Amino acid sequence: MTVEGDIPRLGLTSEEFRQKGKEIIDFIADYYDNLNQVQPLSQVKPNFLYDLLPKEAPEEPESFDQVMADFNSKIMPGITHWQSGNFYGYYPANSTYPGILGEMLSAMATGVGFSWINMPSLTELETITLDWVGKLLGLEQGFLSFKPDGTAGEGGGVIQGTASEAIIVAMLAARNKKVQEYIEEHPNHTEEDLVLFKSKLVAYGSDQTHSSGEKASIVIECNFKGVKTDGSKRLTKESLSKAIEEDKAKGLIPFFVVATFGTTATAAIDDFPGIAEVAEKEELWYHVDGAYAAAALVCPEFRPVIDGYQTADSFNFNPHKWLLTNFDVSALYVKKPSYITSALTIHRDYYRNKATSSGLVRDYKDWQIPLGRRFRALKLWMVLRTFGARGLRNHIRRTVVCPVDFSLLIVQINKQTIADKLGATDIDSEHVHSVFVKANAALHARILEQNTVFITTCDLDGVTSIHIAIGAPLSDEDTMNVLLDTLVSNLELVPADPKVMSA
Ligand code: PLP
């Protein structure tokens, strides 16, 4: 049905919005109620949607019911069900009802709250909720916006869209600091000197650092070195120091290090005390990437394992991963935000206002790459209030599977079992290893094909290993039993798969 005559200014009349909105809330609640019964991974083929949808946007308005019918029949099949209790891929991306409702209210107030003046609550709620979260995590006081007596501190938090944006901002601040120092120490430098100086800057991470570390170095045009990790996949003081010494001998200039709390592949924890020491000695900007695992710090029992982070310059984690808050909320805390703001503030007449000139407010546009920003603090605030600290701790403790690896399980087939099944006496033989590698990859491929649970992989020293990230609110004993049955029934086939046996 096309709508004749006037199109409502807001697309629907208020009456229609009330009715359709309620229907959509029902639709969402039904979706979540039945989510553990559907196959987690979408089965559509590439470009499936191109054939299903018209080639042009409609000229005439269409009814909302028609749009929803198409959503159901055409869009839904391409949805991968990240919120299913049977989804164990990557790391969790928690969604919750308070988070969804927070998104709705944020959409209600839609604005691009880049300066305090154009949506004061957006800015102030962000500052306050990030302090709440910082305190829940037991963060060092220097990262918070307010001191215990209520006066302004030096540090503070800002919501970035993702951990990838957060590390770009942190690296940019680090480079800004280093360049400022160079300029102060070399008042007679030329433009060429400065270009040469910048080209020598090196950021350090490990061979396990998330790709966002390297990407940040591409964006800010510096060198990135992924230092080899130890047997536990940790960046250590010794290997970092050695890499730095080598680079300094080549005339390069170390300026940044990222230490990861919970690496992407195996949830490893870098040597924080050692890295802190090196960062201090070498005057590096010290960034903590706790994108996934730092959510666990709401439980005090996890805090000792990150000891050594306290002297970091910046600390980042994603409440949108394991802390029940809908994507996109990445919390970045910095001790000296002035290094960010002095790098990113650009004055224009159209930004001028009394509040900004007073110096009493924060304009978060100067703490991030884009100008516009959404009211993301609202969903975080709603999650914090509706779950309470107790609810957050329950969620973490309920989904943790072992004390240090948080909610991540890495599974490999036992090599000895493979050797036994092959009747091989030498477990280290090339043949056994080759079957072992193929059997692990085949195990993952089979489970993916069955689509009862969704799991991803990580590479552990050349072996495709199964990466099972628990942490969805809808995962429970029933879904864990499904996971266990799936693993066990597939393991029984090992290594009978003909593709594996032809190894
Ligand atoms: N850092 C770590 C350790 C991660 O595991 C991930 C993603 O899983 C990221 C950074 C990137 O997160 P985002 O998608 O927020 O950029």
Image: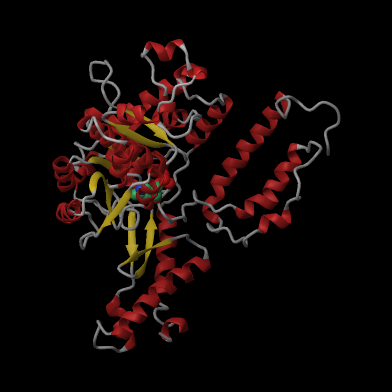
Is residue 249 among the parts visible in the rendering?
A: yes
Quadrant for the N terminus in the image: top right
Vertical arrangement, residue 436 with respect to residue 37, above or below? below
x and y percent of residue 158 in the render?
A: 38, 30
Q: Is residue 461 above or below residue 198?
A: below
Q: Nearer the viewer, residue 431 or 59?
A: 59
Residue 315 drawn at (x, y percent): 29, 38
Instruction: Residue 424: give x, y in percent of width and height.
Output: 28, 88
Q: Residue 80 falls in which quadrant of the image?
A: bottom right
* Quadrant location, the C terminus: bottom left
Name the spot of residue 415 as percent of width and height, x first.
29, 77
Any part of residue 260 in sight: no
Q: Quadrant of residue 396?
A: top left
Q: Is residue 465 above or below residue 157?
A: below
Number of marks: 0
Q: Nearer the viewer, residue 120 or 356?
A: 356
The structure residue drawn at horizontal position 70% and vertical position 55%, both measured from the top left corner, is 50
Residue drawn at the location 27% of the way across and 28% of the way down: 336
